[in-house]
Image (cartoon, rainbow, N blue to C red):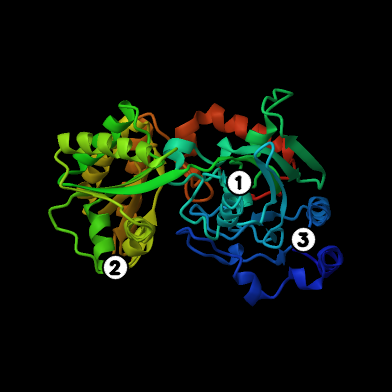
């Protein structure tokens, strides 16, 4: 219970309008973009919106003193319940901390506050001819702090990697309110433990990330998009595998199965032939249009060897936008297919992608469930969407059995539970399967050392 006295102390730090206890307003901070069922405990007692690192530190000092649970929050675009309070307490929103602190063009690095949107970082850097590659599907509204907390991925991960590949340093407020700075602008840095990578992907359980130092790379000079349609899912998967083996590495390689394609076709009123079983959307980039033509030719040769049905190479920006609209509109199109949907996120070794997809199709038949399969085929990250109607008797049990088996498939193939969404609430019961008891115990020891009272994002990961 947060007393009026404690609330008043916090209001003196952040200002009266940034410490909210109205139930109606607090309700807006009780959910995210996941499929977690709501309960009364998800509504925070107090929503706090600090504007500076100093304010975050002072709020955490009070929370630590009184043992108040604190759930950090960006724009709540997460898919595993990471920003949902599970023990009420404080929802600490970093939405006001949205300054671009410094662009260091000489070192090709940028320092931003945690509340800056990913899309804004990309555009700000692009104006200077610099490139910040990570592009989670939510990049137009997700924040850098949230991306770092979840180690977000995105479509360009096949060539450019995920968020952690670009994080050079962090400013972090610890559970007791003390502030530390990790990493820095030096390219080589092996002084002590790698705390930067420890906090990256920690889902707000070890500290509150307030500033991020990101490395950048030169913006590719040429870029284009291709769309390939296949009569079989195996052929599509194998095309990507053969491309990578041949040394053709696209910036993005997105795969959609027939269910996904037809969902988009209905949603956007597109004419896609029913014989098409899979679609691949590729982004290729390079130093010149000659580079693009060479890559496109190699891709076409490989695709034709695997009986591709259609190859489309964008001839204008309008065509690029048309092709990508199929992928960008996919989530909402699939969501409209059934009353309920469980969107999952597994990651397997790249060469196991076709096998994983086949296993998911078998699970779909076994439980008589519609499971749309799409994902970042170039890096082995698969997003199975289990569609269902939970108002039907036995449906809930059947769905969770299917999800259990999907996770088992990922682990059996040498993969893991998540490629980019994190563990949060939805996957915590599976983490011992992935890491083993000793692995989980090691994580808990780190948590105990940094947050002995267990106030930071409690109830997440395990």
Horizontally, residue 368 falls left or right of residue 444, namely: left
Looking at the image, residue 162 sits to the left or right of residue 67; the answer is left
Mark in front: 2 vs 3: 2
**Crowding near the residue tagged with mark 3, few <14, some 14–19, many ≥20 C-alpha atoms within 10 Å:** many
Q: Are marks 2 and 3 in contact (CB under 8 Å)?
A: no
Q: Position of residue 376 (x, y in %)?
A: 37, 43
- State the SS at label 2: helix
Mark 3 → mark 1, Cα distance in angstroms: 19 Å
- Which class describes the residues within 10 Å of circle 2: few (<14), some (14-19), or many (20+)? some
Q: Is there CB contact under 8 Å for labels 3 and 1?
A: no
Residue 182's quadrant in the figure? top right
User: Which residue lies at the image location 38% right of the left edge and 33% below the top edge?
Assistant: 411
Location of residue 268 with respect to 219 vertically, above or below: below
Looking at the image, is mark 3 or mark 1 nearer the viewer?
3
Q: Position of residue 313 (x, y in %)?
A: 28, 49
- The first of marks 1 and 2 along the sequence is 1
Q: Which numbered circle lies on residue 149?
A: 1
Locate the C terminus and report the quarter of the image it occupies: top right
Residue 51: mark in rendering: 3
Q: Nearer the viewer, mark 1 or mark 2?
A: 2
Residue at 66% across / 32% down in the picture?
445
Q: Is residue 439 visible?
A: yes
> What separation in Å lies between label 2 and label 3 (alpha carbons)?
41 Å
User: Which dot marks residue 268?
Assistant: 2
Foreground residue among 375 and 13: 375
Label whose residue precedes the other's in the sequence (3 or 1):
3
Mark 3 or mark 2, which is nearer the start of the sequence?
3
Label 1 residue SS: helix
Image x and y of residue 79, in percent: 48, 54
């Amino acid at each position: 219970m947060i007393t009026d006295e404690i609330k008043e102390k916090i209001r003196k730090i952040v200002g009266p309008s940034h410490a909210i206890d109205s139930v109606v307003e607090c309700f807006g901070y009780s959910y995210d973009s996941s499929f977690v069922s709501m309960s009364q405990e998800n509504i925070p007692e107090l929503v706090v919106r600090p504007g500076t690192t100093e304010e975050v530190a002072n709020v955490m000092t009070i929370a630590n003193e009184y043992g108040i649970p604190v759930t950090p929050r960006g724009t709540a675009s997460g898919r595993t319940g990471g920003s949902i309070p599970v023990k009420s307490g404080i929802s600490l929103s970093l939405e006001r901390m949205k300054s671009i602190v410094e662009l260091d063009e000489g070192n090709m690095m940028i320092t931003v506050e945690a509340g800056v949107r990913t899309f804004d970082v990309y555009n700000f850097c692009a104006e200077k001819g610099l490139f910040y590659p990570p592009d989670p599907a939510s990049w137009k509204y997700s924040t850098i702090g949230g991306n770092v907390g979840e180690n977000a991925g995105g479509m360009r991960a096949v060539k450019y990697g995920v968020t952690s590949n670009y994080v050079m340093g962090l400013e972090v407020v610890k559970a007791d309110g003390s502030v530390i700075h990790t990493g820095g602008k030096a390219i080589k840095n092996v002084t002590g433990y790698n705390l930067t990578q420890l906090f990256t992907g920690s889902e707000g359980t070890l500290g509150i990330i307030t500033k991020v130092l990101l490395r950048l790379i030169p913006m590719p000079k040429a870029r284009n998009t291709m769309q390939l349609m296949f009569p079989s899912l195996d052929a599509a998967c194998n095309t990507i595998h053969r491309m990578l083996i041949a040394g053709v590495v696209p910036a993005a390689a997105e795969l959609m199965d027939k269910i996904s394609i037809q969902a988009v076709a209905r949603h956007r009123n597109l004419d896609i032939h029913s014989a098409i079983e899979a679609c691949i959307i590729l982004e290729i980039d390079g130093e010149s249009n000659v580079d693009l033509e060479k890559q496109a030719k190699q891709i076409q040769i490989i695709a034709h060897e695997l009986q591709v049905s259609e190859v489309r190479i964008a001839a204008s920006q309008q065509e690029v936008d048309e092709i990508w609209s199929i992928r960008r509109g996919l989530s909402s199109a699939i969501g409209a297919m059934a009353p309920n949907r469980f969107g999952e996120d597994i990651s397997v070794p790249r060469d196991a992608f076709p096998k994983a997809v086949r296993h998911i199709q078998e699970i779909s038949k076994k439980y008589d469930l519609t499971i749309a399969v799409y994902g970042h085929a170039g890096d082995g990250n698969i997003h199975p969407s289990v569609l269902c109607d939970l108002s039907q008797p036995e449906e809930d049990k059947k769905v969770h059995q299917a999800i259990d088996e999907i996770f088992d498939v990922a682990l059996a193939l040498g993969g893991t539970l998540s490629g980019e969404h994190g563990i949060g609430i939805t996957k915590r019961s599976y983490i011992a399967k992935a890491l083993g008891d000793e692995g989980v115990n090691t994580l808990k020891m780190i948590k105990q050392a940094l947050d002995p009272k267990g106030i930071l994002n409690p109830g997440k990961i395990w």
